[in-house]
Amino acid sequence: MSAPPSPIDPLRRRLAAALAAGGAAGALPGWAASSSRKRRSPLGVALIGLGGYSRDLLAPALQATRHCRLTGIVTGTPAKAEEWQRRYRIPDRNVYDYDGFARIADNPDIDVVYVVLPNHLHKRFTVEAAAAGKHVWCEKPMAMDAAEAQEMIDACRRNRVQLTIGYRLQHEPNTRAWRELAKTRPFGRLLRVKADAGFNGFRNNPGDAWRLDPARGGGAMYDMGVYSLNAARYTTGREPLAVTARQEIQRPEIFRGVDETMRFQLEFPEGVVADCVTSFGMNINLLRAECEDGWYQLEPFQTYDGIKGEASDGRRFDASLGPRPAMQALQMDEDALAILEGTPPRVPGEEGLRDMRVLDAIFASARADRKRVEIAAG
Ligand code: NDP
């Protein structure tokens, strides 16, 4: 009697098929390329860009992870370097500035570079980190547009490193249970999705300058809108065919050349429609699915903790990971394991690219005053 197939077998089969199909690094999925690398747990992670998210969430989370730990920093601010070195016991040899970043290639303490910079710098440092032979975790939005996202994927493939996007919600248990419903459809045919993500309280602080700067990827759509967009895609389990989008600005003295609020409607196959709103001027945080035989919703659906929801049949989404930064710790541990085991990461670069294609269409539609824009199939 033969042994039952191991869960890893389908992965091995995909890898073998990819190798048989060409063998060149370019033909392999990004995740497969890393399986030849010998890495030991825990992986060393360098955070690049020591702003709010690195400081308040990622560095604390890296104190709680099992399969990775904070070993390096890349910063343009010497005072931060000193403080972080003291707090996290980071030796001088693992501290870089942006100009000297390429030297990281020679540092065996660092396996992964996590790009936590303003959006216009994601491509540059992903490509440089990949060229240095480091795996890359990159924050959302992946890039400024789909062309940049594709360049990032290509660079990581070429250099045989994994590329993973920091969509932390895709690791969160209630969101994962939610996504299963797209497959099992307990409420019959999906008709409509509502995905609203935004906050009010944007005060135009000097530290937020890049979030208002079109050249650095500012505006609500890049920042919060990707949550609505990504959620609409994982709720339907399909790719949108077309979009209609409208930009609104209530405070023109603050929002110059970037969107304060974006409303967009995505058309999916089989007539499913997703109505999405994102804003820097409204507290909105709801994901809802209307189906032929019922509904289900998460509210809030995109906070750092406390994601919860319910459904028309009484079921609840109430799993708890614990307080922040548990979600980021889970995300980074799962992403580290994917590298260590040579398996596909939960959120590969290709997932970020799919969002960037839609984002390009959303901006094109808003620029053309709500023109319906078809989205090229990827
Ligand atoms: P911050 O403005 O707080 O920090 C950005 C840091 O980048 C700065 O502190 C600075 O660090 C560095 N930097 C380098 N060049 C520039 C530049 N030209 N302009 C401004 N800063 C620069 O941003 P966040 O930490 O909030 O966001 C960083 C990234 O993380 C963004 O892509 C954002 O979308 C994403 N993010 C994701 C979240 C999530 O939940 N997944 C939550 C929050 C943010 P230094 O002084 O060290 O050089």
Image (tube, grey):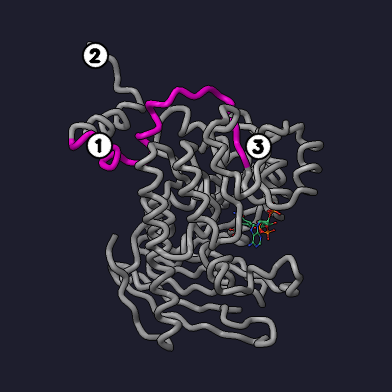
Q: Which mark is residue 2?
A: 2
Marks 1 and 3 sit apart, C-alpha to C-alpha, by 32 Å
Task: Please report whichever mark, 1 or 3, sits nearer to the chain's N-terminal start.
Answer: 1
Region in magenta:
21-46
Residue 327 seen in the figure: no
Judge the density around disc 2: few (<14), some (14-19), many (≥20) Cα neighbours within 10 Å. few
The residue that mark 3 highlights is 72
Marks 3 and 2 sit apart, C-alpha to C-alpha, by 47 Å
Local SS, label 2: loop
**Any magenta on residue 25?**
yes
Quarter of the figure with residue 257: bottom right
Judge the density around disc 3: few (<14), some (14-19), many (≥20) Cα neighbours within 10 Å. many
What's the residue type where badge 3 is placed?
Gly
Mark 3 touching mark 2, by CB under 8 A? no
Quarter of the image containing the C terminus? bottom left
Local SS, label 1: loop
Task: Please report whichever mark, 1 or 2, sits nearer to the chain's N-terminal start.
Answer: 2
- The picture quadrant for ligand 1 comes to bottom right
